Amino acid sequence: MRRERVPVVVVVLAAIGAAFFIIPLLGLVVRSPWGDAVTLLTAPETVKALKLSLVASLSATAVGVVLGVPLAWIYARVEFPGRDILRALTTLPMVLPPVVGGVALLLAFGRRGLLGSWLHSALGLTLPFTTAGVVMAETFVAMPFLILTVEAGLRSMDRRYEEAARALGASRWRVFTRVTLPLIGPSLFAGAVLCWARALGEFGATITFAGNFPGVTQTMPLAVYLLQETNLEASYILSLVLLLVSLVVLVGLRHRWLGSA
Amino acid sequence: MSLDAALRLTLGALDLDLDLTVDEGEVVALLGPNGAGKTTVLRAIAGLVPLRAGHVRLDGQVLEDPAAREYVPTEHRSIGFVFQDYLLFPHLSVLDNVAFGLRSRGANSAAASEKARQWLERVGLTSYARAKPAELSGGQRQRVALARALAPDPRLLLLDEPLAALDVTTRAEVRHDLKRHLGSFPGLRLVVTHDPLEAVALGDRLVVMENGRLVQTGTPAEVTARPRSQYVADLVGVNLFRGEADRGSVRMQGGHVVSAAGAESGQVFAVIHPRAVSIHRHQPEGSPRNVWPGKAGRIELLGDRVRVRIDADLPIVAEVTPAALKELALDEGGEVWLSFKATDVAVYPA
C-alpha cells in the first residue's frame, strides 16, 4: 500500500490531540505510589468501596440484561407508533448529564417522589441512599449502552434462522432462547460488558440519588473523589484500578468497536 | 389426503395467484424462472407469509383461510422445510440441529438424540454428529438439512432449490441421494427448482409457474411434448407459436400463416422442432409447404449441432449440423431461405 502523505499541520494537531489523552494517563501511572499499592488497596475503606462497586455494577448489568434485551427486541422487531420517541427516551441517559439523571430519579423514587411516596407508605420501601439506589442509578445510566448494542445485533442477524426454527415446530419462546439469543451472543456480550464498564464508573447519578455512605453507597468513583481530600495516594491507586478495567474492556471489545478490518 | 393450496398474496412486485395440489404418492416439482414466486409459494404454505385470500388445507384440515380468519402458525403446521441455503443453526452441532425439531415438538433429550442419531445414520453422517455445520461440505450440509426436516416425521416436505447451493460436481451425486430419500418419505412432497433437469429428475409431476401464475402442469413428458409458454419452449428448445387454426393452417399472431397438417380450428399452440427447419441459400423447390426468406441471426454451437436464429416475418430457430453450416457458408446477417413441412408442425389447443 502506498503511504499517505500527511500535511505537517495535521500531524502536529493530531500529536497534540493524542498527547492530551496520554499525558494525564501517564501522570496517573507515574505518580501512583506503587510501593504502597497493596497496603492502600487492602485498607478497609478501599476494600468496602471495591466490593460495593463490584456488587452494584454487576447487579446493574444483570438488571440491564433482563430488562434491556426485551426492550431491544421490541425496538428491532415490532413496529408501533412512537417507537423512535420511546427509543430516544430510554437511551437519553447516554447523553444526559448523570447528575440530572440522579435528580430525576429522586423526583420519581425519592420519599416524596411520584412513585417513591407510594412505595414508602404502602410497602415501607426506601430506595434513595441505599445500595439498591446505587444499582438503580447505575442501571439508569448504563442500560442504554446494552439496549443499543443488542438492538443493532438483532437487526443485523439473519432472521431466516428464526423461520427455520419455527418450521421445525419451535414455540416463539424456544426460538428466542435457542436461536435468537445464541445468534446475537456476541452483541449481547459486548453490550453487557459496555454496560458493566459504564456502571462501574458511574458517579453523578449515584452521588445525587444514593449519596455517599461508606459500605452502603460509596462506590469506587465516589471514593476516589473523596480521597482527594483525605488520602491523595489512595485516590491515585483506585483511579489506576478503574483505568485498568476500562483499558481491558476497550481492548477486549476492540474488534467490535474499532473494527478489525 | 393431500395438500390443497389456493395462494393469493402480494409481496413487493410479486402478485401471486396460484392453485396447487400435492397428492399422496407423487413428487411435485414447482418449476419457474427466477422471480416467478416459487419460494414465496413454499413460504406461504409454511405460514411464513400471510395470504390475502385463498386457503391452505392439509389432509382436509384448514391451515389458513383469511376469509374464515383461520391461521395455524408455522410452528403448528406439520411441515418439513429444507431451505435453499439450508439455514443450519451455526451454534449447534450437527446432532443438535437434527434433534431440534424433535425437541421442539416435545421429545425428551435422550429420545431426540437417539432418533437424530438414526437419521444421521440414514444420511451417512454418523461420524459428524459433534461437528458444527461450518465444518461440513455443501453436500453434507444438504443431507443434514434434509435429516433435520425429516426427523420430526412431517406430513408435508417442502424443498426450496435443494441443490442450488452445490457445485456442479457434487450436484449429480446429491441429486441421486435426494431422489432416494424423497422416494422413501411417506408424506407429501413439493420441490421448488429453477433447473429443468432437476425438476424432471425429481418430479413425477411438474407445475410450471411464471410471474406468480400457473403456466402449465403435467408429467415431465406431457409438459415437454406440449409447451404452453415461451419459458417452457425455451427450456425444451423448440419453436413455439400461438395462433388461430383453420383446417390445415394456422394464422399466427402477427398475421403470418403456416401450413400445419393437424390444424383444425380455434386458438392453438404450434410447435416446430428446430431440426425440422431446413436452411437454403436459394429459394427451394419441391414439396415443403412452408417456405420463406429471412436473415441469419445468432449462430450457436450446441454440442454436435448448430442452432441458427433466422430473422423473418416469423422468427424461427433452425438446427443444422456443423458440416451443413459450412456447406451453406453462412454468416450472421446472411440472406437465407427456410423451409419446413406441414407435417412437422405439432398443433394443440391453447
Image (spheres, coloured by chain):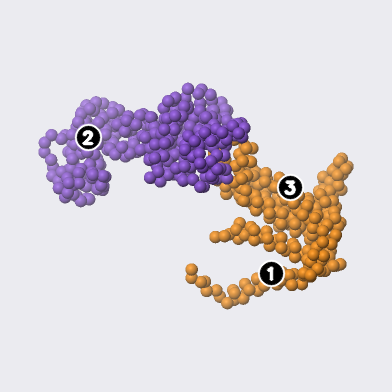
- Judge whether residue B29 can be spotted in this image: no
- Rendered purple, the chain in question is B
Q: Do labels 1 and 3 share a chain?
A: yes
- Pointer 1 or 3: first along the chain: 1
Relative image position of residue B158 (x, y in whole percent):
47, 34
Identify the residue at image location x=82%, y=45%.
A115
Q: What element carries label 2?
A: strand
- Rendered orange, the chain in question is A
Please tell me whether residue A236 is drawn above or below residue B143 in the rendered image. Answer: below
Identify the residue at image location x=51%, y=42%.
B128
Label 3 is placed on what type of residue? Val
For the image shown, how many numbered marks are present on the structure?
3
On residue A63, the disc is 3
Relative image position of residue B267 (x, y in whole percent):
30, 29
Label 2 is placed on what type of residue? Val
Identify the image quadrant of the C terminus of chain B.
top left
Q: Is mark 3 on a helix, strand or loop?
A: helix
Return the chain for callout 3: A
Relative image position of residue B227 (x, y in whole percent):
32, 33
Quarter holding residue B285: top left
Crowd band around label 3 with a 10 angstrom C-alpha radius: few (<14), some (14–19), many (20+): some
What is the C-alpha distance between the residues marked 2 and 1? 87 Å
Return the chain for callout 1: A
Please tell me whether residue A97 is drawn above or below residue A132 in the rendered image. Answer: below
What residue sits right under mark 2 in the picture? B257
Relative image position of residue A127 (x, y in whole percent):
84, 48
On residue A21, the disc is 1
Identify the residue at image location x=18%, y=39%.
B339
Label 1 is placed on what type of residue? Phe
From the image, state whether disc 2 or disc 1 is nearer to you: 1
Q: Do labels 3 and 2 share a chain?
A: no
Q: What element carries label 1?
A: helix
